[in-house]
Amino acid sequence: MHAGQNAATMPRALLIANPSSGGGKVTRLLPAVRERLRALGVEHDLELTRSLEHAGELAGAALARGELPVAFAGDGVAGAVAGAAAAREGAVIGVLPGGSGNDFCRHVGIPQDAVEACAVIARGTPSPVDLGEANGRPFLGIASLGFDSEANALANRAPRFLGRGIYVYGALGAVARWRPARFDVTVDGAQESFDGWSVIVANTSVYGGGMYVAPDARVDDGLLDVVLIRKTGRLRFLASFPRVFRGTHVRERNVSVRRGREVRVSASRAFDVYADGDPVATLPVHVRSLPAAVRVLLPAGS
């Protein structure tokens, strides 16, 4: 599919929906989304996904049939669909916001309203997008570890009625139980060690439902932004936390940003590595950029 293609010549789409995403938001919005897609001339079928692996399998099968896989779920499912497409040259996917955070959509300008975002599926421009890969697992947005591992684990157990508030819930809960760790980080061969809170490897700028943790990250530069948050007291950390929503925390003395194509991280104790809200690897981890790995339907000019 190419820019400017009309609905009559679009391939059939496969809507890959996670019924539990967004605390049931996907299930609630599915009828309206399907009606809007039909009104826009997007012929499609529906599959409900059971897991990230299942979402990738569904996307791969759709591409093999010449169809357009469209993720309607959270960022994790979108990343799984993108990872399946990355294995096929020239593949195109669509993304509709169905999760609690929808941070990939936020970064690239896809509307946060799923029904409104259907227009991007019908009229969007297939645009090259980088992926990240953590120990062989592809992701669209941000991989992180350390304090972020504990915050993500808590957020995933938080009551879904909190919506985007699950990320603040997770972060505040993790602060109370946090003990510093030592991290060894190598970015494109340059190694450094520090005691601190987190290592964040970003393909996109935003995670956690609107935290601009890597404000200068881009999905079309072939690079990863690596945010290192060094040791500081709990009160100072909490005081700086609101700045993450504006991206101004990177000016803090205990925060530094590196940029590169390959990142290796180990730590003084075990951490799960989370990407787009899901555990994808354990330490040590090798994260690399996959430049222009997939084409995603994006709003014109985004």
Image (cartoon, rainbow, N blue to C red):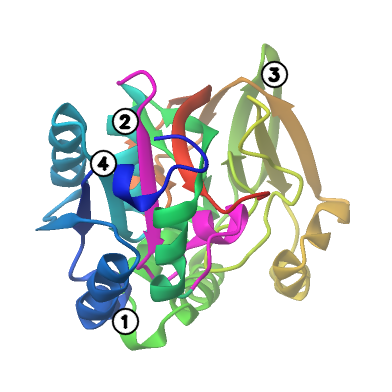
Q: How far apart are marks 2 and 1 (CA)?
A: 30 Å
Q: What element carries label 2?
A: helix
Rendered image: mark on residue 191:
3
Disc 2 target residue? 85
**Picture quarter with the N terminus:** top left
Q: Do the residues labelled 1 and 4 touch (CB within 8 Å)?
A: no
Above or below, comparing residue 164 to residue 109 in the picture: below
Left or right: residue 293 compared with residue 206: left
Which amino acid type corresponds to the residue marked 2 in the rendered image?
A: Ala
Left or right: residue 116 compared with residue 227: left
Which amino acid type corresponds to the residue marked 4 in the rendered image?
A: Pro
What crowding class fits label 4: few (fewer than 14 Cα within 10 Å), some (14-19), or many (20 or more)? some
Q: What element carries label 3?
A: strand
Look at discs 1 and 4 and give the one toward the viewer: 4
Residue drawn at (34%, 78%), measured in percent from left and top? 158
Residue drawn at (35%, 28%), measured in percent from left and top? 91
Look at discs 2 and 4 and give the one toward the viewer: 4
Viewer can see residue 277: no
Please say whether residue 98 is one of the residues in the magenta stretch: yes
Residue drawn at (42%, 61%), measured in percent from left and top? 152
Q: Distance between the residues labelled 1 and 4?
A: 35 Å
Disc 4 target residue? 11
Which amino acid type corresponds to the residue marked 1 in the rendered image?
A: Arg
Look at discs 3 and 1 and give the one toward the viewer: 1
Q: Which of marks 2 and 3 is nearer the N terminus?
A: 2
Q: Which of marks 3 and 4 is nearer the N terminus?
A: 4
Span shown in magenta: 88-112
Q: How far apart are marks 2 and 3 (CA)?
A: 33 Å
Look at discs 2 and 1 and give the one toward the viewer: 2
Above or below, comparing residue 285 to residue 179 in the picture: above
Disc 1 target residue? 160
Q: Residue 276 placed where, x, y %? A: 43, 51
